[in-house]
Amino acid sequence: MDPRHGTEFPDVTLAIIAGGQGRRLSGVPKGLLQVEGRTVLARQLALSPHFGDVLLVANAPAPYAGHALRTVADPVPDKGAPGGVHAALTASRTRWVVTVACDMPFVSLESLRVLLDARGEDVDAVCFEAEGRMEPLLAVYRAELAPHWRALLAEDPSLRLLLSRFRSRVLPESALRAVDPTLRSLVNVNTPEDLARHGVSLPPR
Ligand SMILES: Nc1nc2c(ncn2[C@@H]2O[C@H](COP(=O)(O)OP(=O)(O)OP(=O)(O)O)[C@@H](O)[C@H]2O)c(=O)[nH]1
């Protein structure tokens, strides 16, 4: 599929990063976790009409097969989330990529707009810092970083280290709170306790 035109962000791919093993949730495909009867993946895909393209990064794609999504695996395996972002940058057909982790059930379009509006010619990546932490899995990246990113993967870097190697714009918590007062877009669920706290359910057996 060619990148879609006539959308709000035709030069941006929405990349859902779902290549982890979800060990703290006994290996459940986290994109199939449910909120109010809808999977997290479906909630995130509801944002996709605003973007030029959409992409799923999953090393074990079978659980997501029903969605008929363009799906890629990590070209460099065993690098964790940095390898997932690399996969998205490599597979992108658009100039920019917005990454969303598949374990973030409450990502809003408004929060993505804040990130996307902070792009510029002198910027390679944009993310938020909130409650003292950067969140590089709700972030915008320039796709042409892919080869540089790949070279750095040899060092087994964290996402935060990678961001420090590029021209990254880190937006303050107040920028997100202006559109998302409780920072729900940044919630990610990793453990049974997280599921209970945020009203997220396991997929039906
Ligand atoms: N493509 C890709 N994505 C990954 C990889 N490791 C983690 N992720 C994704 O990165 C995000 C954050 O992952 P984590 O919570 O750190 O790891 P996880 O594998 O989901 O869960 P745990 O095994 O419990 O740590 C999720 O969206 C994962 O799907 C990987 O090796 N490749």
Image (cartoon, rainbow, N blue to C red):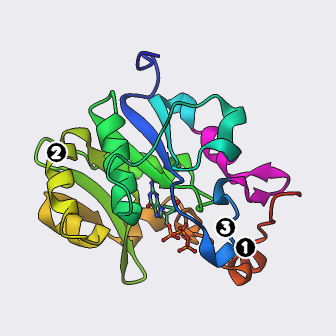
On screen, residue 52 above or below 58: above
Tell me whether circle 2 and circle 3 mark residues in contact (CB < 8 Å): no
Q: Report the residue marked by disc 3.
A: 27
Which label's residue is closer to the chain start, 2 or 1?
2
- Three-letter amino acid code of the residue under disc 2: Pro
Whether residue 24 appears in magenta in the rendering, the answer is: no
On screen, residue 114 above or below 72: below
Q: With 24 as the anchor, is 174 left or right in this view?
A: left
- Three-letter amino acid code of the residue under disc 3: Gly
Looking at the rendered structure, the secondary structure element under dot 1 is: helix
The alpha-carbon separation of the residues under discs 2 and 1 comes to 37 Å
> From the viewer's perspective, is the residue at label 2 or at label 3 nearer?
3
Which label's residue is closer to the chain start, 3 or 1?
3
On screen, residue 59 above or below 35: above
- Three-letter amino acid code of the residue under disc 1: His
Q: Report the residue marked by disc 1.
A: 198
The alpha-carbon separation of the residues under discs 2 and 3 comes to 31 Å
Picture residue at 45% right of the left edge, 18% below the top: 4
Crowd band around label 2 with a 10 angstrom C-alpha radius: few (<14), some (14–19), many (20+): few
Q: Report the residue marked by disc 2.
A: 147
Whether residue 44 appears in magenta in the rendering, the answer is: yes
Q: Which residues are magenta?
A: 32-47
Picture residue at 21% right of the left edge, 52% below the top: 150
Picture residue at 16% right of the left edge, 45% below the top: 147
Residue 126 at what x, y percent from top left?
Answer: 28, 56
Crowd band around label 1 with a 10 angstrom C-alpha radius: few (<14), some (14–19), many (20+): some
